[in-house]
Image (spheres, helix red, strand yellow):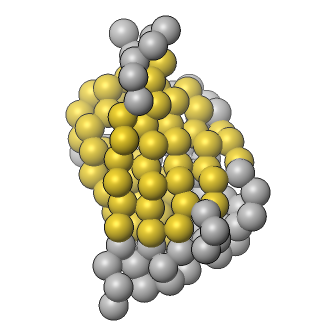
Amino acid sequence: MVAQIATVAYGAKAKKVHTIAITWTSATDGSVVQSFVMDGAIMRMVTNPGGTAPTDDYDITLVDADGVDLLAGEGSNRDTSTSEQVFPTNPPLHTGAVDFTIAAAGAEKIGVATLYVAWG
């Protein structure tokens, strides 16, 4: 089984919004799990399938310590070939660790998810 790979890059905080980009390669079972710290409310998420595109309708969740998906299910059914964006309804304010998870992406697929987080 090939292990998943994920990197988290924090963009500069400017005008009360910053970006968190998660660049990922799925494991053989099509999954990704990456923990990171987030401070603020998710205003937008953009998903961009990579050159080895994930399986159509793969799912992304962003789960807090209480097991709640901060995207409220709006990260489901991402497209295999087109960049997409979601604007979470009533985004919760969150401070602390979260688990970025992907399911059903297919073996060794790549992509980027960029979160736009309001802070302060």
Q: Is residue 92 visible?
A: no
Q: Relative to residue 118, is residue 77 drawn left or right?
A: right
Question: Would you place residue 103 above or below residue 37 in this image?
Answer: below
Q: Nearer the viewer, residue 31 or 65?
A: 31
Instruction: Name the spot of residue 2 as percent of width and height, x first.
Output: 35, 85
Q: Relative to residue 31, is residue 50 drawn left or right?
A: right
Q: Relative to residue 57, is residue 38 drawn left or right?
A: left
Question: Would you place residue 95 above or below residue 100 in this image?
Answer: above
Identify the residue at image location x=37%, y=41%: 9
Identify the residue at image location x=45%, y=55%: 23
The quadrant where residue 51 appears: bottom right
Question: Would you place residue 23 above or below residue 95 in this image?
Answer: below
Identify the residue at image location x=59%, y=32%: 44
The residue most toward the bottom is: 1
Instruction: Name the spot of residue 7 as percent of width and height, x first.
Output: 35, 54
> How many labels, in total?
0
Identify the residue at image location x=49%, y=9%: 15
Instruction: Name the spot of residue 8 as percent of width and height, x first.
Output: 35, 47
Q: Relative to residue 109, is residue 92 drawn left or right?
A: left
Q: Nearer the viewer, residue 26 or 98?
A: 26
Q: Quadrant of the C terminus?
A: top left
The quadrant where residue 90 appears: top right
